[in-house]
Amino acid sequence: MGQWRHVDQPIDSVDSLFDTDTPQTPAELAASLAPPAAPGHFDELRGRASAIATKSEARSQELTPAWGQFFEHLGLDGFTDLDRRSASLERQIRDNGVTYNVYADASGPQRPWSLDLFPLIISPQSWQQIEAGVLQRVRVLEGVMADVYGPQQLLASGLLPSALVQGHPGYLRAMHGVQPVGGTHLHIAAFDLARGPDGNWWVVSQRTQAPSGLGYLLENRLSISRLLPKPFEALHVQRLAASYRALVDGLKRMSPAGADSHIALLTPGPYNETYFEHAYLARYLGLTLVEGSDLTVRDQRLYLKTLQGLEPVHALLKRLDDEFLDPLELRADSRLGVPGLLQAIRAGHVLVANAPGSGFLESPALLGFLPAITKHLLGEELQLPAVPTWWCGEQAALQDVLPRLGERVIKPTYPGPDSFNAVRGRSLPRRALDEWAGRILRGGDAHTAQDYLPLSQMPTWSHEPQSPRIVPRSALLRVFAVCDGPQSWRVLPGGLTRIATASEEVATMRRGGSSADTWVLTQGPGDVDHTTLLAQASRAAAPPLHRKPLVTSRAAENLYWLGRYTERCENMIRLAHLTLDCLNGEDQSSRPLLAWLGDLAVRNALVLPDVPAASLAPRVFERSLIAGLGGHNGVASVGFNLRAVKLTAFAVRERLSQEHWNMIVRAEQEFSRRCLEDIKGGDCASLDAVRMLEAASGQLAAITGAQTDRMARDDGWRLLGIGRYLERLGFLAASLAHGFETGSVHDAGGFEALTALFDNTITFHARYQQSREVAALLELLVLDRDNPRSLGWVAQALEGSLAKLASSDPEKLRELAQHLPDPGRWDLAQLCTVDEAGQHRQLIELLQQCTSAAFTVSDEIGTLYFTHSSAPEPVRGA
């Protein structure tokens, strides 16, 4: 293999870099490939502030020892493989469904999480400085919380301006005087750190309400450590699992029920931009993922609404801003929280992490007052300084800020609808600076200024073949302190590194930035903590603890409707296909058949009621049906129901495999696209529509296969099946009844259409050849309990599923089962009997009973399991 060519020469591929004869080590090759950081920024790769120099001088600088080891263990061959690894990383992120959506939309494409191949490497010495400083700062913030919601001595002494507390919307007066369960207010605190040109770390901001990143950084670690295993092991990178375990164990120790505590993670729901992280964390930590509607407060205690009744919740890890927590005492328009939650907290019956009311700590203005507060509370100097910060609500600070506004970053002191995004003074023209100066003079308390700090720049791997392959990008590090017991914290040895885009220096995911794994190095292999959340090998011989998984009422309801909408899609596709075949086939002269299919199409919202009947204007009816397939013209047709499948599946994404979810999204998107592009009217419209329906039918078969074979057999899955069975029972019974009422069943084409609608054409002809006997039809479609498309089998399967679902409460089972028709009492001779008017009256009554039972059981299931409104639920373990 050759050696690297000079980076200034044109690059067509990675392999083309190997064409010189000068021997180089991997570290020297990396140095020759990597341009220096921008002047004035700290160069993470070379360990020094970057200055203006010639390209050859910049690339001749040696790398830091850690980065040198990284590339040495990557090896020369590793460079040619980086493009493949980078592509593999993107594919892995996409396949794992890792997303971050600024404005999540279930009906639109999701934005994949962005992760760079190279990590941010932090030396043991740097980490010691960060760890000590972060631990000190979280102790200070805990002291501020205890004082502000207690004696308020900091306010009385003037160390903390009252405007930054009582004037901040994050301060909750309802929590004043409340001692949190476990004696700790802050269980997770995040600090955004930047390395300055001098190589020291500075605090830029802090997050305490619901800091995000703990799930994403874990996914980053798992992804990068798999792709770069040799450097990861050789550099003795500290592991993360011990901190996550300590967090959960700490919550249990401090919660009211101790080690037996039930901990839930409260999420705003799947439309939140970081919902992936919420579901990921809940799975990894073994917590119940809940939304506000899953919870209820009874007698000042918090409960989870499940299919088996109310389950007590003793601790709540919230990923929700405080103002949305309780609509009774906070935002009345919030549908994300739990009415009465604050009262349960005040009563000491539930631990909430973090304790509500920490929002004021996130104000950037507070950073300027923490040095004096630290000395007052701890008698210590701050070990980890913050970027110099001025709150413009003070006259002295205002006079200091305005003359040098072009060198500052202007930030809003308070959050809210009237707040603004941070503004860098150096990026503003003179006129804009004067306008900002006027705003600050008119409302100084709403503005905070910070010194501009050039962010350090770390190496990133570029996909662009004509650009330098290793590109420096500005980076911001978010570090987490987690509580492992009362008034005790530890710093997670790593963090979420956010990387700015090439066009701007703001490192944020909201503006299209990327992320990187964070490697905290240890002194040697003996210092690496190999704690895992997996079961220990020493305990393998012990019988595993079997816990019946909890299924929340919200998840159960969405799974139930996922089953119904999936079955409804299949029914609509089959009915639409049959109707189009009839309108363009040999049977279009059969009036009973046209009347039957036309009525079914209208009843099932394939066609609007004001469209002329199929028997009167078949072409008009056909065009209306085709035009409505996408569900955009006021009809609840196939496209409408496919979107309903996606929406209900979106609400329970944490229960679906990524492949299952991808199939649902692909089916809806492809059907919608074909409706818009492929069907253009004219003679080929019907053929295009049939092909489109056939493709959707195949995709739905894959979706139902995933539902059947790839989901855990818990009560949620049983409700999904019950939803399918009820939908099938109601649709097929009503269709068969109408086939007899219109006389279509006595027509040759109608007879065939009935067996096709029941998806039993092959079975019928294999069993009865060319028979057109009504008795044979009813035996297969109504009585056969081995045929999954017969009414007898559906009723039997429904009863069996309900029995397993309600096994803990036989009374519920009896109440539900009594609504279902009993196939054991059905008699073929009676069903075939014709009355004086020539009608199969007993058959019609049975089919009407089946249809009515589908509606009644559906309503009863909603009352018993979803709304919990029929009677007081059993409460266990309170």
Image (cartoon, rainbow, N blue to C red):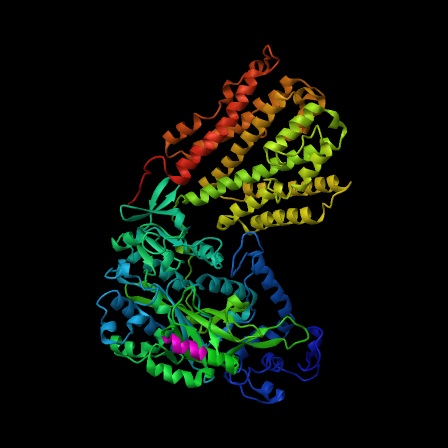
| Depth order, front residue of 520/230 | 520
Instruction: Look at the image and tell me in which quarter the N terminus lies.
Output: bottom right
> Is 506 on the left-hand or right-hand side of 616?
left
Query: Does residue 307 show up?
Result: no
> Taking 543 as reference, is 94 above or below it?
below
> Is 355 on the left-hand or right-hand side of 815?
left
Measuring 61% from the left and 37% from the top, which residue is drawn there?
Answer: 570
Residue 440 among those drawn in magenta: yes
Residue 646 among those drawn in magenta: no
- Residue 602, position as x, y percentages in the image: 61, 33
> Taking 509 as reference, is 606 above or below it?
above
| Depth order, front residue of 335/349 | 335
- Residue 215, position as x, y percentages in the image: 46, 61
- Residue 303, position as x, y percentages in the image: 33, 47
> Is 374 on the left-hand or right-hand side of 768?
left
- Residue 564, position as x, y percentages in the image: 53, 38
Measuring 71% from the left and 41% from the top, which residue is drawn there?
Answer: 689
* Residue at the farthest right position: 683
The region drawn magenta spans 436-444
- The number of callouts visible is 0
Measuring 45% from the left and 74% from the top, which residue is drawn there?
Answer: 521
Query: Does residue 347 show up?
Result: yes
| Depth order, front residue of 808/449 | 449
Instruction: Look at the image and tell me in which quarter the C terminus lies.
Output: top left
Q: State whether the magenta stretch is mostly helix, strand or loop.
A: helix
Measuring 23% from the left and 76% from the top, which residue is drawn there?
Answer: 157
